[in-house]
Image (cartoon, rainbow, N blue to C red):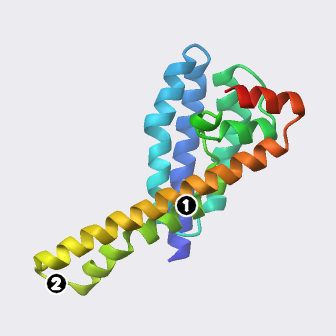
Amino acid sequence: SSGINAEYGEKKVAEWVGELNSLTNIAKSEPQTAFSAFSVGLSKRWFFIMRTTPGISELFQPLEEVLQSSFLPTTINRHVTPSHRDVLALPARDGGVGVFNPVTTADTEYTRSIDTTAPLSKVILEQCITIEPERAWALATELKSAKQIMVTSKRAAEKNTVQCVVSHMSASEQRRHEEL
């Protein structure tokens, strides 16, 4: 099973590297268009695989390499150092642009997906043809609660990441970051 996951993941990543290279070429003349296509299109397909396939984080390394060495530098028109890359991965509300690192994100996204959908998965595995209205209401409440827990934990993790990134900045970089 893990061999099939790896084979499928490698095939998808190879396709996405090609698409990301195409977006990089577009970014040379239309950086906003390329960034928009990445943000709303290409990266969302990565999330689907991350959330449904366990243990594939390292397969995303070729994508991260293209993000850091080609796509981001071309899009923002400047060299991207590893520390700058960390800042760019932050959500916009925290001073980044939300271009996450797929290698460090994949396993967490899978775990969050499993945790959030656990109540629904349990009902599906029971193979019930009908669900009593009270049970359906309880299930809806449980799913809502699971989603809220996921959102809260994701935001807490983002705050920790921001603190870590900021702690590695120079004093002048920290001041600029605080102004955002």
Residue toward you, 112 or 75: 112
Mark 1 surroundings within 10 Å by alpha-carbon count, few (fewer than 14), some (14 through 19), many (20 or more) = few
Q: Residue at x 32, y 81 (%)?
A: 122
Q: Which residue is drawn at 47% across and 30% down?
A: 37
Q: How many labels does the image show?
A: 2
> Where is residue 144, by image quadrant?
bottom left
Amino acid carrying mark 2 in the image:
Cys
Q: Is mark 1 on a helix, strand or loop?
A: helix
From this view, report whether residue 47 is shown above or below residue 27. below
Residue pointed to by mark 2: 128
Residue toward you, 49 or 1: 49
Task: Give how far across and how far down residue 80 sits, in percent.
Answer: 77, 31
Residue 67 appears in the rendering: yes
Residue toward you, 98 or 148: 148
Task: Give how far across and how far down residue 153 sits, in percent.
Answer: 55, 61
Q: How far apart are marks 2 and 1 (CA)?
A: 32 Å
Q: Which residue is drawn at 84% across and 38% down?
A: 169
Q: Residue furthest right?
A: 170
